Structures are given as structure tokens and as C-alpha cells.
Amino acid sequence: MEDFKRIYYERLQEEIHAPVDGKLLMPGIDPLLRSIHKRKDIYLGLLTGNWQTSGFIKLAYFGIDHYFDIGAFADDSEIRDELLPFAIKRFADKHDKKPKADEVYVIGDTPSDIQCARPHGAVAVAVAAAHFTSEQLRAHKPDYLFEDLTDIAAVLQVLG
């Protein structure tokens, strides 16, 4: 598996720069990240089904890797529902405080993102700007649903 990962990371580094349609950031994500980064009352973390190395290769491609210094990855568990406790523990270790469940927001664009918040009492924020429509995501009952992240004020209002 380690050999596979090494080769995968090397290929990803090469292939990510190949021209192809569809390599775009979700609308609104860059200004939203900048706005959140300026605030002292909101902390960012990354929770992804990617391995840590490949996740950061992808974030670096878009120039947003510097926003995320804690997270949880497929290296921690291949089961998405098990990732949030890893991210929370890393946050607690780094900041010497543990957030209450309802202070944790999982923002994502898939049903898996909504579902992984549920067992831990986190707030699920769904964004229908990628492969799933609003109707498809609404069926999984997120706490909040956005078409995209362009309305920065509305997203920040949800986050507190």
C-alpha cells in the first residue's frame, strides 16, 4: 500500500497540472476562506476522504492549503463517519479546548459529508455546487443548504 500511495502521489503531482475542464474551486470558496481566516472566533479544519498527502496536493493546486492546519483524512479511517473525532481531537490538542458538538460545522457537497456530521451531533451544511443537486442533498436532511458559497454573509451568519 505504501508503494501504491507513493506512486499515486507522484502521478497526482504531475496530472493535477494537466489541462482539463472542471478543475475549478466551488463558487465563493476563496473569498469565504479569506473571510473566515480573518476571524478569531471561527477555526478551519479539513475533513476529507483523501489521504492527507493527496488532500494537500489538491489544496495546494488551488492555493488554499495554507488555510488548513488541522484535519482528518483517509489515513485516519476509510470510514467517513469516523473522521470527525480525529479532527476534533487535533483541534483540542492544538488549541487546548474542545468544542461542543453544536459548535462544529461540517460543510460539504456530498451526502457523505452530511452523514458524517450526524453521529457526532455536528451541524451539517450542504452545498449543491458540485455533483449533487439541492434536491438530492435535501433528501439527507442537512441543517443548512446552500446552492453555492457566494453569499458570504449568509454562510458566515450560519457559522456564527
Image: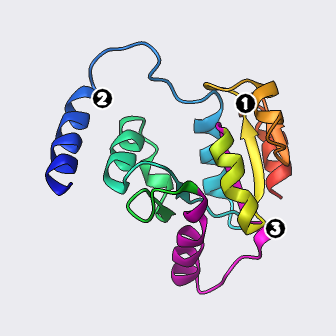
**N-terminal label among 2 and 1:** 2
Q: Assign the N terminus to one quadrant of the image.
A: bottom left
Q: Residue 18 is drawn in which quadrant? A: top left
Distance from disc 1 to disc 3, alpha carbons, whole Å, reads 24 Å
- Magenta region, residue range: 81-110
Q: In the displayed structure, does residue 76 sit left or right of residue 11?
A: right
Residue 155: x and y in percent read 79, 43
- Residue ID at (68%, 67%): 40
Q: Pointer 1: what residue? A: 150
Can you tell which mark lies on residue 16? 2
144 is higher (above) or lower (below) than 159: above
Residue 157: x and y in percent read 86, 49
Asked if labels 1 and 2 touch by Cβ distance under 8 angstroms, the answer is: no
Q: Is residue 52 magenta?
A: no
Amino acid type at circle 2 is Ile
Amino acid type at circle 3 is Asp
Distance from disc 2 to disc 3, alpha carbons, whole Å, reads 36 Å
Q: In the displayed structure, does residue 97 sit left or right of residue 52?
A: right
Residue depth check, mark 2 versus mark 1: number of the one nearer the observer:
2
Q: Pointer 3: what residue? A: 102
Amino acid type at circle 1 is Thr
Viewer-closest of 65 and 132: 132
Q: Assign the C terminus to one quadrant of the image.
A: bottom right
Viewer-closest of 75 and 28: 75
Distance from disc 2 to disc 1, alpha carbons, whole Å, reads 25 Å
Residue 32: x and y in percent read 66, 42
* Crowd rating for badge 3 (residues with CA inside 10 Å; few <14, some 14–19, many 20+): few
7 is higher (above) or lower (below) than 118: above
- Residue ID at (61%, 24%): 131
